[in-house]
Image (cartoon, rainbow, N blue to C red):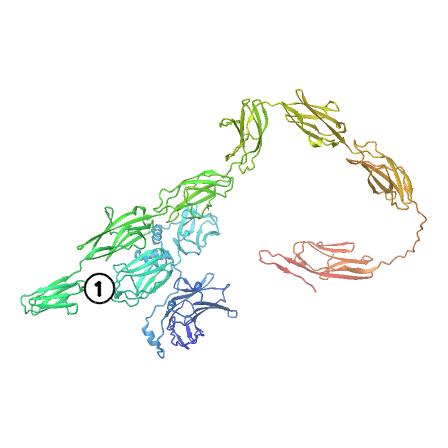
Amino acid sequence: LKDSSHKNENSVIIYSPSEKTMFHREKKAILVWKDMRVNKKKKDRIFIFGSAMFIHIILFVTGKNVTFVAKVDSSQMLRKPTMKWLKGKWMDLGSKAGKHLQFKESYDRNTKIYTYELTIVKVVDGDAGGYRCEVTSKDKCDSCTFDISVEDAGEDAGELDFSGLLKKRERKQKEEPETDVDVWEILKNAKPCDYEKIAFQYGITDLRGLLKRLKKMKKVEPKKSDAFLKKLGPAYSVEKGKKIQLNVELSDPNAQVRWLRNGQEIKPSAKYIFESVGGIRKLTINKCTLADDAAYECVVGEEKSFTEVYVQEPPVTITKMLDDIHVVVGEKVEFEVEVSDEGANVKWMKDGVELSRDGKYRFKKDGTKHWLIINEATTEDIGTYYVYTSGGESKADPSTIWLIFQLSEQAVFKCEVSDEKVTGKWFKDGVEVTPSNRIKMTHIGRTHKLVIDDVKPEDAGDYTFVPDGYALSISAKLNFLEPPKIHLDTTGSFVNKNTIIVVAGNKLRFDVDITGEPPPTVCWKKGDTEISEAEGRVRVETRKNLSCFVIEGAERSDEGLYHITVTNPAGEDKADVMVKIVDVPDPPENVKCTAVGEDSASVQWDPPKFDGGVPVKGYLMERKKKGSSRWTRLNFDIYESTTYEAKKMIEGVLYEMRVFAVNGIGISQPSASSKPFMPIAPTSEPTRLTVEDVTDGTCALKWLPPERIGAGGIDGYIIEYCCRLTTEWVQANETPVEKNSYRVRGLPVGEKMLFRVTAVNIAGRSPPAVMAQAVTIREIVERPKIRLPRQLRTKYIKRVGEKVNLVIPFQGKPRPVVTWLKDGAPLDTKLVNIRTSDVDTILFIRQAAREHSGQYTLSVQIENMEDKVTLEIQIVDKPGPPIAVTVTDVWGFNAALEWKPPKDNGNCEITGYTIQKADLKTKEWFMVLEHNRRPSCTVSDLVMGNEYTFRVFSENICGMSDDACISKNTAAITKTGLKQKQQPYKEKDMCSSPKFITPLVDRSVIAGYSAAISCAVRGHPKPKIIWMKNKMIIGENPKYLMQNNQGVLTLNIRKPSLFDGGKYTCRAINDLGQDEVECKLEVRGMAKNLHHLQCVTLTMT
């Protein structure tokens, strides 16, 4: 479709199927659709070629479909390009895809051309504007810009007259291709009067902050540096959401650098990436946000390189468009529009001319809403109104204005001349007045009158009576005197009739409409101080019929009652306006931890001293571990109280807390961090507190540890006591005791006392465990009683060599006397150890022997009261072997045995015998009988022709005897006339040719790892084995190890390389023939520094 007749590569051909005409013009094309009766199934297609081209298209057909086609050559691209269709400067049409806007893309593999299509279905007036198609691939970018105007179609006008069309159109200058601009460079080279215009053009909202930083930058003069070969630029700009890279070049490639942001050092992370290539140091900031708009420094030793990074906010778009308005002359008109950002600046225009603040037009703003107000509409106000932002446009076209006037007073001019016959004429501002229904002129005698009914503002002026024939005249002036009036607009920021609220730091611009004739004088005061009209932070701007009160960057000191007074000769008017400055509150104070628990802590703080002028709604809390920089938000809903219990904390870890105050304006700065605290809970109360012993003046207590201890552990226990009739508790121990028992001393004898025990750790004391009943402090006589354990009530049996430890508790008060006897005689303490306490006695034998067996008597005695128990101890051992084992009879396949019990039964009863037999030929012993109770037995199933011997083991509760008694005689089982018939022996011929019974198997191995291949062969005589690789005999190569084990053949390959792959053959040869098998071995190698495996197969045929 590119026109071959024109060599200019930026030329374009635009073809309309419905018109079947073609028109060419360099750098610009004009296309006119004329035929409204177009087949609706066809689409007009506009093909766009070339680079940095501008196309202007006028569509005279509304409701028609139009398709734009862009083709991209990707023959030199590695990846698929990205195409964007944009309207205006910022609006991405990809997000508007739907029934009205349709997108399509295709790819031709032969020509490697991507085709992108944008179809506008049923073109409407709103589709008019500038468009741009932009294609990007990595760091390459190309774009094409075109403009669309939409008009309604008229009647068929015949043939197209392009020459006439071109004459009527003004020639536009060639547009340069769009390039990335640096706002910093534009501001530095611009005049101060152009700053606001540049800020609006590039969507800058914080112009004052930007100019402050620009002023600092201009003062910095570059100095020569020994550490830096190339420093950072003075400033950088980046769009929000994109990344930026800061580069410096050092003279020393090994030098260490530090990157600072607003004086704070930056740590490497996913957002901030540090790079070092030789002497170049790079800082990459990913996904820039408004928080990254700051001053950055690169520090090398004592030298620094400084720069500013400015993050451009996204364009402001219009969310609520203008509406058409029909008004009556004299009525008030309000145009309302809503934008996407509260800080956005907008421009109002009428028929292409920007509107300014004067008596006729007023601008008002509340959040994202903007108003254009016309106080009294006239016929001159008919036109098209536009509102512009940095990223959108809206317009409204008012309809016909109806004219309505109201009746007013009557004005009479009277003039008396010297003669009745003198006539004359009336003039207004030099123009003769003509009579009408409203204007009447009369001449009665010498009096001439001019009467004007329904006086209107346009009737004001100089009226003159000129007599005919005389060079004289008399004049009078018609003036309208209107008392001054202040018109307060109570909408917008007003909270009531005379109070306006301003957020601290914001700009207040308060417009007051003033009427009166002649124009009144305006005076603003705060208290007795008059506010001047000179430039300043707080100032007054006066225009025709309008007074503007301005506060730049509102502060708390600006709060107060302001008085406005307007005066003129007709009178005076006054009004009061209360300006209230609201701000975020001050931080809360005195944050402290009042109590801690196992996993919780109670925090308390004082409200902020200043609430910002708005009641504090609540608080937000954060905590962190001591030493950490990461704060964790504890509540996301506002918390109203000044005490808070933080939960889900880790016991034993130090924490810090801080608090934010919240009001209707925002969140305060954080409070100072609290002192570190540790969540540790005291233990629960000790359990099972009981009285162990009571004597005259003492009481022994015992208890169990608490059920819940926690991370703080237990440092000890505090024991307290008090008399039953008092509530004063006395601490019995000065320092905590670690044991679970304690004897309280120094108690009054005969008194009834109460006791309680408390566990102590780092968190404090636990709840006390209190004894339920009072204890009388008095010695109690108790009969002695031995509590013999159940296992000692029968015979106590132990093996030789084992230890004996018998604990026998007893009771009795006072402490009884304990006596031990063995077999009625005093116990020898050299053989047995005895240990006795207040409550039990212990009999201990380290290694038991048979002489320790016997009857032991324990006696417990208090005065004439006594208690005794007897226990029997038996020490047992393995028995000896039986005596005199004899074969008493042999018959058939059976033999009878008899023996006598052993002399040593091991100090216990013999429980049985074990009998074994052995053939005299093999002399291997086999089990015959186990646990035989009698000293005799019969052995059956003996083998004929064999002679047997027997042995017997004795058994008791300790096991079998170590030795056995062997029978003195043997038992021979004779043959009973059987005769074996020998068969003639015929030797078998075992010779055979080699044959592989298990073949070789193909294998795939990894290079560097030893491998083996195996097969099996049989043949007689033993065949000779030959291994071959690719039909070549391997021989005595040390890399290969050949083995033959009972016909199993193995070839081991030590650490094979890629060249060891191939076909391996095993051949077996003997005198009767030969046989061979083969397999294929594949060696795979792992290549370094590559992303895939390489496989090499060597095959020889």
Figure check: 709 above or below 744: below
For the question of whether residue 231 can be seen, the reply is: no
> Of 1011 and 681, which appears nearest the observer?
681
The residue lying toward the viewer, choosing from 1053 and 228, is: 1053
Determine whether the residue tagged by mark 1 lies in a helix, strand or loop.
loop
Q: Position of residue 180 (x, y in %)?
A: 40, 60
Instruction: Please identify the quarter of the rendering in which residue 188 is found.
Output: bottom left
Name the residue furthest right.
977
Can the viewer see residue 40 in this picture? yes
Count neighbours of disc 1 (C-alpha within 10 A) and say few if under 14, some if 14 to 19, many if 20 or more: few
On the image, the x and y values in percent for residue 222 come to 37, 51
Q: Amino acid at mark 1?
A: Gln
> Based on the displayed image, in which of its 4 quarters is residue 924 positioned?
top right
Residue under the image location 50 percent in, 35 percent down? 763
Q: Position of residue 424 (x, y in %)?
A: 9, 69
Q: Residue furthest top?
A: 863
**Quarter of the image that includes the C terminus:** bottom right
The residue at which mark 1 appears reads as 406
Q: How many marks?
A: 1
Residue at the far bottom: name it: 158
Work out whether 102 lies above or below 670. Answer: below
**In the current view of this chain or complex, which residue is farthest to the left?**
419
180 or 488, which is in the foreground?
Answer: 488
In the displayed structure, 56 sits above or below 840; it is below
